[in-house]
Image (spheres, helix red, strand yellow):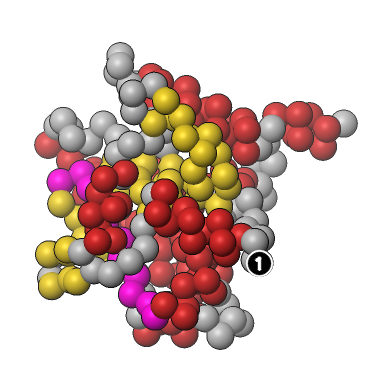
Amino acid sequence: MIDALGIRNATIQESKDFIHGIQDIVASVPPFVSKYLEDSPKSKKIEIEPPQLTTFGDTCIFTWEMKPGELSDFLPDVGVFLSYVIVLGLKKKLAFRGALSVGNYIQSGATILGPAISDAAAWYDAAEMIGVIATPQYGQLLSTTNETKRFTTMEFLKYSVPIKCNISKELWVTGWPDLLDAISHKDEPNFYKTYFSLIQHFPIPKGTEEKYFNTEKFVKWAKPPNMFLASAV
């Protein structure tokens, strides 16, 4: 479950742009995931049972039905999939933040209910930065899986996430900075030039600046600037 920062009080034109951006993202994600899973036995699942998207207001719910035995195999792919949504959002001038959960749910058209949805709903607007966090409940599964299948920095990272009430919690978060670098590196090797060129287009009304400052801190933690200085020498 994700929402777009700054859309709740959008103008009619901004709302239209949001709808068009979401439509473009929905159309772009399945081909990316199929390409990412290419030559893998898992590629058939995205064709037969692709993730579903439901929207209401400025909030989007992605659901992906799978059997319990499939969870550990697909967890890394879910991280990349959601990182791609964040990257596409930035390119569409949409700053997404949200939460990821796992569990039972039922879906009938635009109606989605169940423990997994309730868990995600309790956390989707908690993070004070751009990105998708795992709820504490889902984080336990990620920690267990990480002991046998180490996540790459493009999938999930354990980070001290700033959340509401001026506190931070150690949570799993999708590794979208690494994916942004991988996607943009051919056209622009300087990762920070790419990042700031995207962020500069976002309006930052007074009172929202901490979310962007926190996002910058996360990006610099995930992709330390000295990495790029060293590679340029």
Task: Verify whether residue 61 appears in magenta.
Answer: yes
| Residue under numbered circle 1 | 148
Task: Verify whether residue 125 appears in magenta.
Answer: no
For the magenta stretch, what is the residue range? 57-67
Q: Residue furthest right?
A: 233
Horizontal arrangement in the rendering, residue 188 relative to residue 85 (left or right): right
Question: Residue 126, position in %: x, y?
Answer: 33, 36
- The residue lying at 47 percent from left, 85 percent from top is 44
- Write down the quadrant of residue 167 in the picture: top left
Q: Residue furthest top?
A: 206
- The residue lying at 55 percent from left, 27 percent from top is 217
Type of amino acid under label 1:
Thr
Q: In the picture shown, does residue 17 fall above or below 165?
A: below
Horizontal arrangement in the rendering, residue 3 relative to residue 128 (left or right): left
Identify the image quadrant of the C terminus.
Answer: top right
- Write down the quadrant of residue 26 in the picture: bottom left
Question: Residue 100, position in %: x, y?
Answer: 38, 54
Observer able to see residue 165: yes
Q: Assess disc 1: are there few (<14), some (14-19) or many (≥20) residues with their C-alpha within 10 Å of its C-alpha.
A: few
* SS at circle 1: loop
Q: In this orientation, which residue lies closer to the viewer: 136 or 206?
A: 136
- The residue lying at 28 percent from left, 61 percent from top is 116
Observer able to see residue 192: no
Question: Residue 90, position in %: x, y?
Answer: 42, 41
Q: In this orientation, which residue lies closer to the viewer: 40 or 108?
A: 108
Q: In the picture shown, does residue 8 fall above or below 57?
A: above
- Write down the quadrant of residue 13 in the picture: top left
- The residue lying at 47 percent from left, 53 percent from top is 139
